[in-house]
Image (cartoon, rainbow, N blue to C red):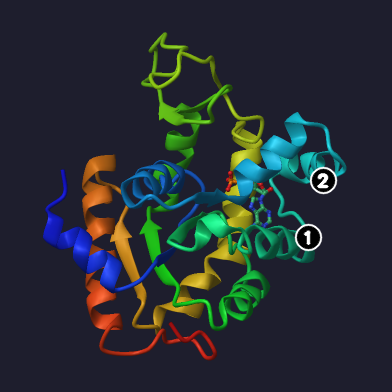
Amino acid sequence: MRPVKQMTTEVTRGPINLVLLGPPGAGKGTQAVEFAQRHGTPKISTGDILREAVRSETDLGRLAKVTMDAGGLVDDQLMIAIVRERLTRGDVERGFVLDGFPRTVAQAIALDEIMTGQGCLTVVDIAVPDDALVERLARRRVCGQCGNPTSVAAGEARDRCEKCGGELVLRSDDTESTVRERLRVYAEATKPLVDFYSSRPTFRAVDGQQSPAAVGAALAQAVEEMRAARSAGDCGAEGTAG
Ligand code: AMP
């Protein structure tokens, strides 16, 4: 249970609009679920939105599947339109956690524009070096039913989700060749976002090579520090007044 004082502080400082950056396999999904639950805000994962579209065989799903299975990035304008629409829904009034968006500088610029007058972004990069990621992604499984990500140890026979009992599956884009392409695309298109955001007072990096609980604690502390700093200053992005 969180102390009452902390909850009061959160309310008076307004919504937390959190963007989680980091390479594939850094643990963004796990941290996004935890953080969103703790703060009662929606987790908006563009990867989940696309996977749901693939499952439902919509036009978007058919379009995205080829790109996703090849480890590439879905078109910027399409992704921007999806997020723009999602951020108009009422449930983001108390804030949101964005996981997997923005992934390019064009998406980050569009997000600043979408957020104009809607409050500050709080950006946290979960940093993990490349060599640790390939191994992590090989161990990653997701629940085919609820989407909960988990990690299986080498030789471990576990095949059921701890949360809902659904079947654990390997994501179709977690095969070794696709993982390598996703890491290449990350380095080329997404890593520059660290430079894009790093001069803002609302940016922090946390060490993603700790246990999920330790990363969660570092993330919570980083967000709290930024919120304290923010109440004394601005968002750090032109046009996004909070
Ligand atoms: P994720 O679950 O975030 O790793 O996303 C899985 C895949 O969905 C990515 O490898 C991309 O193909 C696609 N995707 C998700 N989010 C975006 C985005 N913001 N921009 C472009 N493609 C995306």
Quarter of the image where the C terminus is located: bottom left
Q: Secondary structure at mark 2?
A: helix
Q: Are marks 2 and 1 in contact (CB under 8 Å)?
A: yes
Residue at image coords 26%, 65%? 10
- Looking at the image, can residue 194 be seen? yes
- Which residue bears the numbered disc 2? 60
Query: Residue 52 sits in which quadrant?
Result: top right
- Which residue bears the numbered disc 1? 78
Q: Amino acid at mark 1?
A: Leu
Q: Residue furthest right?
A: 59
Residue at image coords 51%, 15%? 166
Q: Residue furthest top?
A: 157
- Looking at the image, can residue 211 be seen? no
Q: CA distance from mark 2 to mark 1?
A: 9 Å
Query: Residue 77 sits in which quadrant?
Result: bottom right
Q: Amino acid at mark 2?
A: Leu
Instruction: Residue 205 in the image: state x and y as whole percent.
Output: 33, 66
Q: Earlier in the sequence, mark 2 or mark 1?
A: 2
Residue at image coords 75%, 38%? 53
